[in-house]
Image: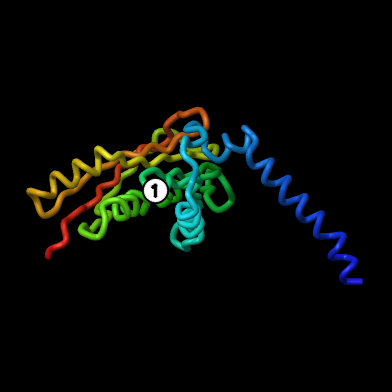
């Protein structure tokens, strides 16, 4: 009886998995996943997909209510989504400011650690947030550290032992309207030989 059930259920499960994969690739699903930034130009690598999975399961980040939706293969671009859910909703029915801020917390530090390499020490040093509008729908953030940014950091650290670098991240809705401006100060130093 069990074998008969498995023979019948296996194709059904496979069909449901295929359907969910196809529905996840529709324009509406992609808009929900990536927001106003659109579908990324480069596909995720296996390494970046695994990093995204680990990031989303990490308890501190999971608790923020945010979700990493994309990590570039070179780990220089990360996209985060903060939906309005029961976990992120505050007393007045909008996204809790702490969820907005926490969802942006470790991302820049990790981008710089991965791209600068073992010769540098990177720490989050400070952060500030300026709320522009209440978050009444899903908000999106895009973290991008360019090759020029990395080159400038390395150049500055040739003549200095450490430096602080400020990055600005906007949390925007699907229309691109800024709801929160977040500044993150990252401390970067050369490792002493």
Residue at (29, 46) in percent of width and height: 184
Residue at (47, 62) in percent of width and height: 58
In the drawing, does residue 4 fall left or right of residue 175?
Answer: right
Q: Quadrant of the C terminus?
A: bottom left
Locate residue 105, reporting x and y percent: 37, 52
Does 112 appear above or below 131?
A: below
Locate residue 133, reporting x and y percent: 44, 33
In the drawing, does residue 65 fall left or right of residue 184?
Answer: right
- Callout 1 environment at 10 Å: few (<14), some (14 to 19), or many (20+)? many
Locate residue 63, reporting x and y percent: 49, 58
Near-viewer residue (56 or 85) = 56
In the drawing, does residue 128 fall left or right of residue 38?
Answer: left
Residue at (47, 47) in percent of width and height: 96
Q: Quadrant of the N terminus?
A: bottom right
Instruction: List the residue tagged with mark 1.
Output: 104
Query: Where, by quadrant of the figure, is residue 84 drawn?
Result: top right
Near-viewer residue (14 or 66) = 14
């Amino acid at each position: 009886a069990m074998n008969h059930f498995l023979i019948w259920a296996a194709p059904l499960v496979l069909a449901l998995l295929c359907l969910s994969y196809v529905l996840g690739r529709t324009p509406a699903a992609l808009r929900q996943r990536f927001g106003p930034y659109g579908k990324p130009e480069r596909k995720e690598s296996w390494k970046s997909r695994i990093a995204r999975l680990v990031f989303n399961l990490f308890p501190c980040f999971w608790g923020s209510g945010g979700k990493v939706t994309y990590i570039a293969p070179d780990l220089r671009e990360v996209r985060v989504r903060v939906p309005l859910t029961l976990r992120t909703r505050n007393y007045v029915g909008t996204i809790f400011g702490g969820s907005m801020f926490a969802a942006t917390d470790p991302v820049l530090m990790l981008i710089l650690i991965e791209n600068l390499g073992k010769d540098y020490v990177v720490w989050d040093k400070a952060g500030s947030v300026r709320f522009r509008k209440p978050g009444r729908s899903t908000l999106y953030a895009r973290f991008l550290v360019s090759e020029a940014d990395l080159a400038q950091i390395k150049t500055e650290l040739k003549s200095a032992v450490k430096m602080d670098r400020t990055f600005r991240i906007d949390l925007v809705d699907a229309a691109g309207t800024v709801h929160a401006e977040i500044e993150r100060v990252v401390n970067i130093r050369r490792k002493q030989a």
